Image: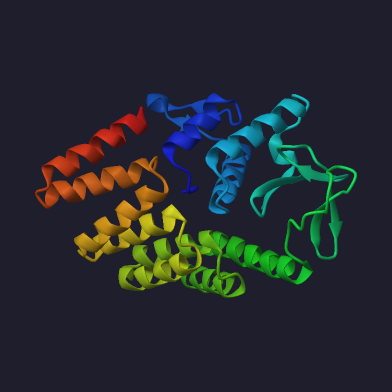
Amino acid sequence: MLGLSRNAIVRLVEMGFVKPRRGSRRAYLFSFQDVLLLRTAHELRTAHIPTAKILRSLRRLKDELPPEAPLTSLRIMAVGKDIAVRDRDAQWEAESGQLLMNFEGGLQSTPEAVAGEPRLLARGRSAGRQRASAEELFARGEALEDVDPGAARRAYAQAIAAAPDFTNAYLNLGALLCEKGECKEAVRVLAQGIQHRPEEPLLHFNRAVALEDLHRFPEALVSYDRALQLDPELADAHFNAGRLYDELGHRQRAIRHYSAYRRLSR
């Protein structure tokens, strides 16, 4: 649901970034604050920031904050290939602690903080407003899914129109279409998302699931394999690919994927 692999979530739990309770059968029970932080981690990942860098930055932030202050009290965002942090008083780069100034052209490093020319780190105002509008439309779609799926579908489509690289809008719209039996349209929507975000493994994964529902198994396996090339720790892709290979009689390939799934699920 959050777009994170099981392994990434377990690492965030082990490092203390989120502190879920244990439910029946020792299942993790996440609070709303936990989900917000996990969502932030996913947004950084979809911006193609390496997982190791995300964990390193979150660990530094956690170490610097007072114990009573949660990470969700900060606005954490991807700015180019860096992670920027903002509170009510300032904004800075998460890894280096370097202060950032908000000019009309975007976020820039202060000359005092780094030698040489300031680096342009963010989009301008108009792009920022467009992204904010897409975020609002996406939130509306999420709120409407259970009460008015048709309106949710329109909201997601509008979010995509406002921000054609909005990965989560493609993912949610594709899932909603498949739930309504429109998997062929879901494949088209997810393929459109892949054109804009070809390196996003979850788009390939969800496309594979939709192709499975259409019984287009060879194409589904190609999409699962592509998802795993981009994120080898995507355990569910290993499981689904193993199951498909097993059904198609390719036992050795199935065993390899099942083994990877078990290793990642420990």
Residue at 51% over, 30% down: 11
Q: Residue furthest right?
A: 112
Instruction: Name the residue nearer the viewer: 119 or 93.
Output: 119
Residue 123 visible at all: yes
x, y percentage for residue 46? Answer: 54, 53
Give the farthest residue toward the left. 249
Please name the residue shown 30% across and 36% down the image.
Answer: 261
**Residue 87 appears in the picture as rendered:** no
Looking at this view, name the residue that lies furthest to the front.
116
| Quarter of the image that includes the C terminus | top left
The percent position of residue 200, horizontal first and vertical second, equals: 47, 56
- Residue sitting at x 37%, y 73%: 188
Image position of 245 (left or right of 69): left
The answer to which of 50 and 246 lies nearer the viewer is: 50
Percent across and percent down for residue 74 are 75, 42
Q: Is residue 201 above or below residue 162?
A: above
Horizontally, residue 34 falls left or right of residue 150, namely right
